[in-house]
Amino acid sequence: MFLHFLEQQVHKLAFLEIAHLAAKADGNVNWKERGKLRSYIEEMGLLDVDIDLSNPRSLAEIASAVQDKSVQKIFLIEILMLLYTDGDYNDEEKEIVTDLKDLFGFSDETYESMREWVIAMDKLKIDGIKLILNA
């Protein structure tokens, strides 16, 4: 949704690394999460880029390279949206988000605002699907 605002290649690749870590946090990357990961590559214009996620860096190492607050907000919102995709926001995923929030230095209030917005957007998407299917 907001990844097209990322201009630097290093930010795009860092986001993909974090998204990959987050998606597999619970040991299972389901089909919805895989679809989101593919859509991220497309949205950021990385279809022709060789992306190697086989030797992942730690979350702290990746996050330390992202200093721009706007980019950090994009990362956290998009990761929340990814993890809410499958309807199962479990403890392992919550831990990744909490660690990312802390690494970026976001307050609990800022995090809650982002989380509430993501939940509201998810509900709107579901409502839209219901409108289409029940018409």
Image (spheres, rainbow, N blue to C red):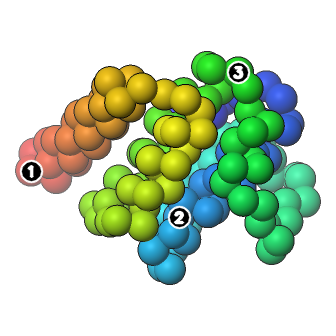
Secondary structure under tag 2 reads helix
Question: Do the numbered discs 2 and 1 sit on residues whose CB atoms are within 8 Å?
Answer: no
> Disc 3 to disc 1, how far (Cα)?
43 Å
Residue at point 55%, 29% (across, down): 105
Closer to the camera in the image, 63 or 45: 63
The label number, if any, that marks residue 23 in the structure image: 2
Question: Is the C terminus in the top left, top right, bottom left or bottom right quadrant?
Answer: top left
Give the mark toward the camera: 2 or 1. 2
The label number, if any, that marks residue 68 in the structure image: 3
Amino acid type, mark 2: Ala
Secondary structure under tag 1 reads loop
Location of residue 124 by image quarter: top left
Location of residue 119 by image quarter: top left
Amino acid type, mark 1: Asn
Give the mark toward the camera: 3 or 1. 3
Give the mark toward the camera: 3 or 2. 3
Secondary structure under tag 3 reads loop
Compared to residue 99, the image places residue 108 above or below, namely: above
Amino acid type, mark 3: Asp
Residue at image mark 1: 134
Residue at point 75%, 48% (across, down): 62
Q: Position of residue 4 (x, y in %)?
A: 66, 29
